[in-house]
Image (cartoon, rainbow, N blue to C red):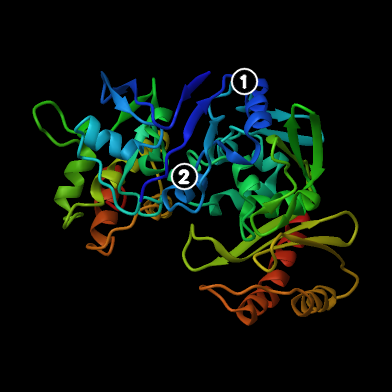
Amino acid sequence: MKPRPFDYIRPDGVEEAIALLAEYGDDARVLAGGQSLMAMLNLRLADPSVLIDIARIPELDAIRDLGNRIEVGAAVTQNKLLAWPKLAEKLPLLAAALPFVGHFQTRNKGTVCGSIAHADPSSEIPLSLATLEGEVVLRSKRGTRSLAAKNFQLDMLTTAREADEMITAVRFPVMDGRGTAFREVARRHGDFAIIAVAALIDGEGIARLGIGGMSGAPVVRRIVLDDGAAVKDAVENLAAELDSYEDLHASADLRRDILRNLAPVVVEEAVKCAA
Amino acid sequence: MRRVNRDQKVRISLSLNGRKTSAETEPRMLLSDFLRHSLGATGTHVGCEHGVCGCCTVLIDGTAVRSCLTLAVQAEGRDVKTVESLAGSDGKLNKLQQAFQNNHALQCGFCTPGILMSFTDYLARNPNPTEEELREVLSGHICRCTGYAGIMAALKEAVGLGK
């Protein structure tokens, strides 16, 4: 199918882009890589009056090392971040998770921030941002604010972004030398995950566990690794507590089962990685 | 700022396979349709139109992307390469194309242009890939004839793997 008609606007800078968002609000959609939005337009699941194309804005196409955080601009593609020479050292969780995002060809155009904006419940990048407890930078004519990941993604495809705001960047905290691990179960490599699990070792004897695909937004919990059964017990409780959704690919029970089996493996990998 | 209103047709220029060209488009026209219908470059095939099948993959500024998930206006001023760019002017197949022919890596051939363009980008970045890496890139394409065995054989031949 083809998209319905819309006005196309390609602003030269962020100031112009946010002025357009102030003018059009909910009638406009921001287009960056378009790897979700263009498909939704073609399928007529999205029907904006105005498309604001930010992909060519030079100030948004930068990865900045802020010391304890890495800032990724809204026009940075997933493959550009994956090829960033310091990725494995600074953001090993992203180095592990990004190869699971779509395919080589879609990562060439799909952006890191676009995946955050789209807020699919099983997506790898929102899960990584939530597990690392990073933040989303939003700008509008009213000013700039940054929101913690857990306050940004509210539910399935639903975020706290106001109609006149655009995401200009996301900031991932640097995990200096701590163990991290990532795994997912999908029908085929490159498909949306049924369940995705991220883990990192959060100081002495504490694991941080991030789960995608169980709820409308990523779930992040801390587990004290005091005895051998701690992870198993925590995951068992989580599986019972989380109100898992169902779709064509997996029932709620299957999702719980995958979580029970996958999460302990990923935590163990993170522990080994930290040692 | 570039602005094109919904009912407006504008002429956009781009480089197609090394030659400057231009044609009219409206904002909602996909690059895949623009290439085929407006520029007559029908080597690029259109399958699913939502980024899944990979048939429509082309290079924009050397990078393999889905032309069905790209608007024609987004390619304005860019360097676009399609499967028509691969063979020599005398019609001689390039190394990758020849490997596909040698290994019966196509049957109906509908998916082939996209696969060739993906690997034109990928092999320029990584000329000595592993079999795993080749499989990973190929996973971005759907072929309904070959079962992928012939395609893998062709790719391995093209990069000198498994000899």
Quadrant of the rendered image containing residue A211: bottom right
Quadrant of the rendered image containing residue A260: bottom right
Q: Residues within 10 Å of mark 1 (few under 14, many from 20)?
A: some
Q: CA distance from mark 2 to mark 1?
A: 22 Å
Expressed as whole percent of the image width and height from the top left, the position of residue B111 reads: 26, 51
Query: Which residue was labeled with disc 1?
Result: A13
Q: Chain of mark 1?
A: A
| Mark 2: secondary structure | helix
- Is residue A3 or residue B45 the one in the foreground? A3
Expressed as whole percent of the image width and height from the top left, the position of residue A136 reads: 75, 41
Taking the view exactly as shown, the residue that stands out farthest to the front is B7
In the image, residue A193 above or below residue A167: below
Whether residue A36 can be seen here: yes
Query: Which residue was labeled with disc 2?
Result: A38
Whether residue A62 can be seen here: no
The image shows a total of numbered marks equal to: 2
From the viewer's perspective, is B48 left or right of A173?
A: left
- Is residue B155 or residue B27 the one in the foreground? B27
Q: Amino acid at mark 1?
A: Gly
Check if mark 2 and mark 1 are on a common chain. yes
**Residue at 87% in and 61% down:** A206
Instruction: Give the numbered dot on residue A221.
Output: none
Q: Residues within 10 Å of mark 2 (few under 14, many from 20)?
A: many
Quadrant of the rendered image containing residue B11: top left
Q: Earlier in the sequence, mark 2 or mark 1?
A: 1
Expressed as whole percent of the image width and height from the top left, the position of residue A245 reads: 65, 73
From the viewer's perspective, is B46 left or right of A80?
A: left
